[in-house]
């Protein structure tokens, strides 16, 4: 038995489906939306409608985009021979922020997870393979998460791509800048040691 | 008892909220435990790679109402070669998936725990073809559902045994054949595994016989769990 008017209850139910929003938060947000000026609330509604109607996936790299191709794919100054493979479109934003990469991307839209039954055929792997030749890709950077699913995905793709004569690289694992050595776990610290580099002195 | 310590193997994880994970562990003294690891998905988390399958960790947990909270974790064994090899990982994950199904929350099973850590150790060190099959059959035996492989489950005759039927829980002789056909070589390996000579079975090199035994083990386990295992098929043929 709901004690709210039907539209209010509908709003609470819909908000409650959002990730990380529990029933109490949903209730709080719903009442906030009812309290603020109508135009503010409608602006949110329009933003959602617009985003859903105008945003699609890039037909080439599966990044989110407003048109057929995403901003990165449309940008002619970018190096088409280097491809950075990421799990999700939001990872592109993270890599772009570094300013260290000038190639194109490929979004897998997930990662291999044997325990959840997610295999390569549920990801955009076939689409990745068809891009290699037309775009003359010479290097694929496997930029999946350094967790068990991401590493399984990287290993799988490595096996698939290496026989094709393409340079396949994996992003390095190491210590976060600004952190303390003593808190690093053995695996990360071990990899940081393995991937150590000669000191460049200016 | 609001704080407790235990050692456990990470079976699987679920994302929770912004940066947390629910970690499902199989602990030595508390059975299966579902606990929250706060902030593990952040790059600067103090847990780092410690709470990922199939790591074995020493833990300090804080008892919660629903889920416990992991306050400290130290690696006991990270089975690095399992993590860093796709084939071993697939085999390791199938063992974790089975333990996740067999183990119950609040029901300690130290023997199953020792079997799991032992099997992971063998997988990490030598990766013999029958490590998963051996683990499945031993785990079934330990739960009291070990198949009968030295005589026909219908008539009790000792041979030759030519088929395996998960439904009847064992091998069948020619006149009573049902289920999967089994070659004489595979029947001998099954008898080794379940007859206390697992070491000999683990020493076998990969062959059509070991794949046959592997398939029988998966069928027996899936029948017992009454569900299909997800992990064996995901990376098949790669």
Image (tube, coloured by chain):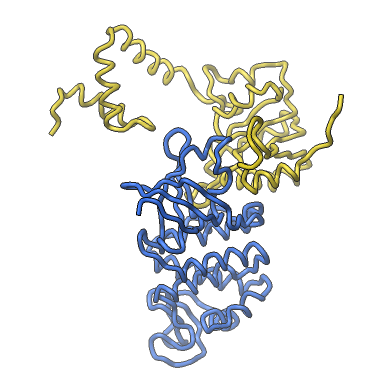
User: Visible in this render: residue B143?
Assistant: yes
Residue A22: image quadrant is top left
| Chain identifier, yellow in the render | A
Quadrant, the C terminus of chain B:
bottom right
Camera-nearest residue between B65 and A116: B65
- Residue B186 shown left or right of residue B179 in the figure: right
Q: What residue do we see at 61% from left, 36% from top?
A: A127
Q: What residue do we see at 70% from left, 39% from top?
A: A170
> For chain B, what colour was chosen?
blue
Residue situated furthest bottom in the rendering: B157
Query: Where's residue A164, x and y in %?
Result: 75, 43
Quadrant, the N terminus of chain B:
bottom left
Query: Where's residue B100, x and y in %?
Result: 44, 58
- Residue A38 shown left or right of residue A185 in the figure: left
Residue B141: image quadrant is bottom left
Query: Where's residue B107, x and y in %?
Result: 36, 64
């Amino acid at each position: 038995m709901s004690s709210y008017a039907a539209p209010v209850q509908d709003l609470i139910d819909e908000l409650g489906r959002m990730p990380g929003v529990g029933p109490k938060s949903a209730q709080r947000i719903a009442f906030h939306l009812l309290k603020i000026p109508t135009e503010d609330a409608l602006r949110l509604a329009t933003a959602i409608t617009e985003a859903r109607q105008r945003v699609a996936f890039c037909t080439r790299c599966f990044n989110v985009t407003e048109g057929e191709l995403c901003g990165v794919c449309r940008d002619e100054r970018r190096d088409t021979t280097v491809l950075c493979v990421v799990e999700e479109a939001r990872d592109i934003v993270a890599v772009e922020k570094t300013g260290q990469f000038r190639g194109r991307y490929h979004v897998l839209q997930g990662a291999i997870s044997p325990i959840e039954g997610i295999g390569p055929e549920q990801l955009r792997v076939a689409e990745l393979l068809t891009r290699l030749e037309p775009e003359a890709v010479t290097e694929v950077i496997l930029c999946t998460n350094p967790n068990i699913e991401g590493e399984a995905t990287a290993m799988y793709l490595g096996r698939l791509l290496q026989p094709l004569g393409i340079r396949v690289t994996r992003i390095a694992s190491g210590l976060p800048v600004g952190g303390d050595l003593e808190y690093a776990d053995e695996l990360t610290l071990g990899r940081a040691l393995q991937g150590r580099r000669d000191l460049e002195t200016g | 008892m609001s704080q407790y310590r235990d050692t456990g193997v990470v079976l699987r994880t679920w994302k929770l909220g912004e940066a947390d994970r629910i970690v499902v562990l199989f602990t030595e003294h508390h059975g299966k435990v579902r606990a929250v690891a706060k902030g593990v998905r952040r790059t600067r988390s103090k847990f780092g790679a410690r709470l990922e399958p199939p790591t074995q960790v020493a833990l300090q947990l804080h008892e919660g109402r629903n889920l416990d909270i992991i306050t400290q974790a130290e690696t006991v064994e990270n089975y690095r070669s399992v993590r860093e090899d796709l084939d071993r990982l697939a085999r390791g994950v199938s063992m974790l998936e089975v333990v996740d199904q067999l183990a119950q929350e609040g029901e300690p099973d130290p023997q199953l725990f020792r079997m799991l850590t032992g099997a992971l150790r063998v997988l990490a060190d030598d990766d013999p073809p029958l490590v998963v099959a051996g683990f499945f059959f031993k785990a079934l035996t330990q739960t009291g559902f070990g198949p009968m492989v030295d005589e026909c489950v219908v008539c009790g005759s000792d041979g030759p045994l030519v088929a395996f039927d998960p439904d009847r829980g064992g091998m069948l002789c020619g006149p009573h054949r049902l289920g999967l056909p089994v070659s004489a070589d595979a029947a001998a390996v099954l008898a080794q595994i379940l007859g206390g000579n697992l070491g000999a079975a683990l020493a076998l090199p990969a062959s059509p016989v070991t794949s046959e035994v592997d398939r029988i083990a998966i069928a027996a386990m899936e029948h017992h769990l009454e569900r299909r295992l997800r992990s064996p098929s995901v990376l098949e043929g790669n």
